[in-house]
Amino acid sequence: MTGSSAPETATPLGKRPEVRAADLRHLEAGPAASPVVAVGVPALETGDVPLLPAGMPDALVIGGVSLALAVPGELARRRGFRGRRGETLVVSAAEGPSVVHLGCGRGDELTTDALRRASAALVRAAGRGGQALFLLPASLASQLPAAPAGEPSLAPAPRRGAQAVAEGAVLAGYRFSAHKSGDDDGPVDVVMVAATEIEPEVVREGVRRG
């Protein structure tokens, strides 16, 4: 007699990262209790080497270590990094966190989905444990489109941008399998969203909604 087996269901493994709004000034002041292992920097697609969004600093100090944020042109060309949606270029440093350049596509075609994909890519690239930092400049978030004519208005673009980053980080933290394993430590512990020229309360509200 052959019995029927119950259908397999996906079981979430590990844990999802906690997502927080962060203040760059505090990060630059000194080392955090849990180390920052990766800094995610949005990169915009161009005809050549991807560019940082306007208003993004050329360098950032994390825990006393200065990190160059500009996309390294020669390395980008060698690895075929064009800044397309979902692409990443990881630059490891001898000291301090890695810089993960996150392709967001063309600035004039930015969508919340592009930000979700960028945030998810940061979580995947950051590895396990520690904290990852996503930099969200106002100039990038402000390029999110408004609602089409005749449709209900959307939340302010900066809030939608922060929310999309939080959503991408949370979704990337879920991995599913038919068999649960206790050996999976999960992704990074925390993803911090730090904005430039966006009011802190706007970022906090977006992260909370994500």
Image: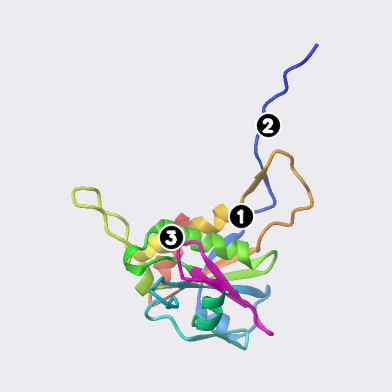
Q: Is residue 194 visible?
A: no
Q: Give whichever of 41, 28 is nearer the camera.
A: 41
Q: Which residue is mark 3?
A: 114
| Occupied quadrant, residue 195 | bottom left
Distance CA(mark 1)–CA(mark 2): 21 Å
Q: Is residue 120 left or right of residue 34?
A: left
Q: Is residue 161 left or right of residue 81?
A: left
Residue 128: assigned label: none
Question: Quick one: label 2 or label 3, which is nearer the N terminus?
Answer: 2
For numbered disc 3, what is the local secondary structure?
A: helix
**x and y percent of residue 45 in the render?**
41, 70
**x and y percent of residue 165 in the render?**
48, 61
For numbered disc 2, what is the local secondary structure?
A: loop
Distance CA(mark 2)–CA(mark 3): 32 Å
Which residue occupies 65% across, 63% down? 189
Residue 8: assigned label: 2
Which quarter of the figure is the N terminus placed in? top right
**Contact between labelled residues 2 and 1, with CB atoms less than 8 Å apart:** no
Other-residue count near label 3 (Cα within 10 Å), few / some / many at <14 / 14–19 / ≥20: many
Which residue occupies 66% across, 60% down? 187
Question: Magenta region: which residues?
Answer: 79-102
Q: Which residue is mark 1?
A: 173
**x and y percent of residue 184 in the render?**
75, 53
Which residue occupies 61% across, 55% down? 173
For numbered disc 1, what is the local secondary structure?
A: helix
